[in-house]
Amino acid sequence: MRQAPGDAPPEEDTTMSRIQLRNRGLILEAALEVFSKQGFRGATLDQIAVEAGLSKPNILYYFDGKEDIHVTLLDQLMDRWLAPLREIDPDGEPLEELMCYVHRKLEMSQEFPRESRLFANEILQGAPRIGPHLERDLQPLVDWASALIQRWVDAGALAPVDPRHLIFSIWATTQHYADFETQVGVLMDSAQVHSGAKAHLDVLFRRLLTP
Amino acid sequence: MRQAPGDAPPEEDTTMSRIQLRNRGLILEAALEVFSKQGFRGATLDQIAVEAGLSKPNILYYFDGKEDIHVTLLDQLMDRWLAPLREIDPDGEPLEELMCYVHRKLEMSQEFPRESRLFANEILQGAPRIGPHLERDLQPLVDWASALIQRWVDAGALAPVDPRHLIFSIWATTQHYADFETQVGVLMDSAQVHSGAKAHLDVLFRRLLTP
Amino acid sequence: MRQAPGDAPPEEDTTMSRIQLRNRGLILEAALEVFSKQGFRGATLDQIAVEAGLSKPNILYYFDGKEDIHVTLLDQLMDRWLAPLREIDPDGEPLEELMCYVHRKLEMSQEFPRESRLFANEILQGAPRIGPHLERDLQPLVDWASALIQRWVDAGALAPVDPRHLIFSIWATTQHYADFETQVGVLMDSAQVHSGAKAHLDVLFRRLLTP
Amino acid sequence: MRQAPGDAPPEEDTTMSRIQLRNRGLILEAALEVFSKQGFRGATLDQIAVEAGLSKPNILYYFDGKEDIHVTLLDQLMDRWLAPLREIDPDGEPLEELMCYVHRKLEMSQEFPRESRLFANEILQGAPRIGPHLERDLQPLVDWASALIQRWVDAGALAPVDPRHLIFSIWATTQHYADFETQVGVLMDSAQVHSGAKAHLDVLFRRLLTP
DNA sequence: TATGAATGAGCTTTCATTCAT
DNA sequence: TATGAATGAAAGCTCATTCAT
C-alpha cells in the first residue's frame, strides 16, 4: 500500500512562552483576516495591528516584517490545504473516496474561506512567495494522487477521466464558493448556498466518475 | 422570444480625437497587464506609465486617477464577460446551447486570462469597485438564464440541476485555467492544458446535463 | 617624464537641465554640511531637506536615497582631495615641490574643512562606502608619489625619509586643523590658527626634508 | 616644581558590589568597541548589549541611557588621554622630555586605537558631549604645557617653535595611525607601520626641536 | 497634449526607552 | 538584579496626485 507523501507534521517550536504563542496566534489570525481581504500589498501593518489589538512595533517584535507574517501564514496554510488530498485511501472504494474528497474540500471552503482566498490571492499574483512550496509539496502529492486515480480508471472502477483535470475541477468548484463568495452572495440566497452546493457537486462528480 | 437583458451598447464618447483614443487604449491595455498581475493596491501608476510608454502625468490627463482606470477597465470587462451568457439562445437545443456556453467560456479563459484575473482579483477583495455592477448587470442576467435553464429542466430537455449552481460550476471550472494558471503550470505540461481541459469539461457537463 | 595616474576628469552628465543641476547642487551642498557634522548615520534626510530648502520627497526625486547622496559626495570629494598630490611635478625642485604640497594641503584644510571632516568620518568608520575608491584611486597615486620621493631621496635631493610616513604626516598635520577644529578653537585664538599653522608646518617639514 | 593640573582621581562610587563593577566594565568595554566603530548615532544599544553579553534593559539598569554610557566613556578617556602630557617633567631635559611625549603618544595610539577613534568621533562632530571637559580639563593643561615649552624655547633648550602648533602636530601625527588606520592599512603593509612610524616621528620632531 | 518637478500622506521599519515581573 | 514584552517617536522611502510650463 503506497502512502501519500509529505505527511510529516510541522514541528512547532516548543521554546515559545505562553504569551508568545498567544500573541503570535493573535497576529496570524489578524493577518489572515487582512491579507485574505486586501491581498499582500493592500494589507498594512496598521490594519493587522488594530485587528490583533497590538501595537505596530509589537507586531514586529514577533515577526521579522510584513513578509515574514505572510510567509508564515502560507506555510501553515499549505499543510491544512493539502491534507484532504493526502487522506484519500488507496485501498478504499474508488468512487466513494473521491466523492468524500469533494465533500471534504467543499467543507473546507465553507469552514476556511479566508484561507482559500489567501491562497487564491497568492496564486493569482503568480505565487511570488509560495512558488517553491508548490513544486516541493504540491507537485509530488498531485503526482501521487493522479497515478492512483489513473490506476482506478484502468481497473474500471471509475469512468475514464484525466486525473489532473479532475482534480482541477474539484478544486475550482469547491473553492469557488469561498473565493467568489461576494458574487455568489449577490446571485443566491446565502442560506441555500451550502446545502445546494453539496447536492450539486455530488451529482456533478458522481455522474462524471461512475463507470 | 425573450431577450437577454443588458444589450445596450456602451455609449463611446465620439468627441475623442484619434490620438486620444489611441492613448486611452494604450493606458487600458497597460493597466490590464499590471492590475491583473499585481492587484489594485499592488499596481502603481509608474508601472502602468512605463508599460504604456507614457508619462505619469499624461496618464492622469486621460483618466481621473488610478481608481478611474480600474473602474473603466472593469466596466469594459463586464460587457465582454457576460456576452457568452447573453448569447445562449432560448430557442436552441438546450444541451447544445449549454455545452456551447461552456466551450465559449473556456475559450475566453484562454484568450483573455488577464481579464479573468482582473475580475477574480476584484471579487476576491469583496468587489469594492464592481459591486454595483454585479447587482445591476449580472444579477438580472443570471436570473434570466436561470429561469431559462429551469424551464428546460422542467421540460425534460435537461437532467435535473440547480441552474445557479450549474452556472457557478461552469464559471469556476473554466476560469480556473486562467486564474490559477501558475498552479496549473506547475502541475501539468502547459501544452496539454487547453485540449485536455476542453475534452474534460465537455464530458463533465455533458454527463451532468444529459437527461 | 612620468605622469600621475587617474587624471581623467569625471564626465558630468550633460543631459541635466538647469534646474536639475541647481537642485542637485543644493542637495549636495546641504548634505555636505549635515554629513560632515553628524556622520552618515547621524544625518537625516529631514536635516538635509531643510538645509537645502527642498521637501524630503523632492530630495529623493534627485537621488536614489540617503546612501546615494553620500556616495556621490564622496566620489566628488576624492577627485578634489587627491588633486594636490597629483600636481606634484616630478621635474620640479624636490624640496619646493613637497613644501608646496604641504601648503596646498593646508589651504584645502582651511578652504574645505567640511570635506575634510566628511572624509575623516568615512575613514574612521572603516571606509564602508569609500573603501573601493581607496584601493582603486588612492593606492596607485600614493605608490607613484612614494616612488618619486624615494628617487629624490636616493638622488640626495631630500634628507632620508620614509615616503609613505612622510605623506601620512603631511595629511595628519594639515587635516588636523579641519578635523579637530573644535578642539583647536578651544585651545587657540582662531585668528592665529591659519598663519601660525602655515609657518609651523613650513618649519616642521623643511627641517625634516632639507638634506 | 610645578605640578600639572587636573590630577584629582575620579571618585569611584565604592558602594558598588563586585557584580555591579564587573557589569559596568563589560558595558563600557562593549560600548567602546561599538561607539568607536560606528560613532554615537550609528551605534545601537542592541549592538552594545550583544557585545557585552547582557540584555538591553539590564544595560539601562546600570546606565541612565545611551548618552550616559557615552559620557562615562569619554570621562574615563580624558584622564587616560591627557596623562602623557601631564607626565612631562618640567625639570627634565627639554628635548628628551618632548621626544618621550611623542613616543608615549604613539604608543597610546597603538595600544588604544579605539579610544583614539572615540575621541576623534566626538571632536569631529563638534564635541557636543565632551565640550565642557575640553575647557575644564584640557585647556589649563595645554596652557601649562605651552608655557613650559615656551620657557624651554626662551632658554635656548629648544629650537624656536610655537608650543601649541607643536602639540597639535604631535597629536595629529601620532593619532593618525589609529584614526586613519583603515587608510593606512590600504597604503602600507601593516607589519611595517609601527616601527616605521616610531622612527619617522623621532626624526621629524627631533629635527624640528633640536636647537 | 505632454511632462519635468514637486509634495502630502502614508508605508515599513528601527530604536531608545519603559513596563511588568 | 535581570529580562521578556511593549511602545512612542522618528527614520528612510513610496506613491497617487498636483503644479507649472
Image (tube, coloured by chain):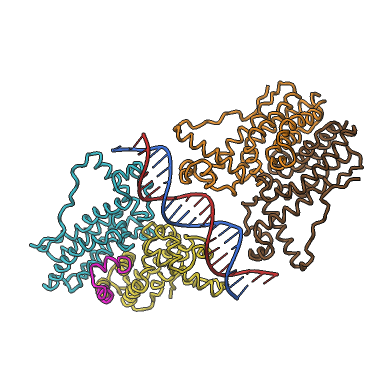
Chain colours: A orange, B brown, C yellow, D cyan, E red, F blue
Q: Going by the image, does A39 lie left or right of D22? A: right
Q: Position of residue A148 (x, y in %)?
A: 73, 27
Q: Position of residue F12 (x, y in %)?
A: 48, 57
Q: Going by the image, does C167 lie left or right of C46? A: left
Q: Is residue E5 above or below residue B89?
A: below
Q: Nearer the viewer, residue C4 or A151?
A: A151
**Image quadrant containing the N terminus of chain D:** bottom left
Q: Going by the image, does D139 lie left or right of B206? A: left
Q: Position of residue C59 (x, y in %)?
A: 50, 65
Q: Residue at x 28, y 44 (%)?
A: D62
Region rendered in magenta? C177-201
Q: Going by the image, does C13 lie left or right of C204? A: right
Q: Nearer the viewer, residue C12 or A20?
A: A20
Residue A81: tell me if it is visible: yes
Q: Residue at x 47, y 71 (%)?
A: C26
Q: Residue at x 68, y 29 (%)?
A: A104
State yes or no: residue C20 in magenta.
Answer: no
Q: Main secondary structure of the magenta part?
A: helix
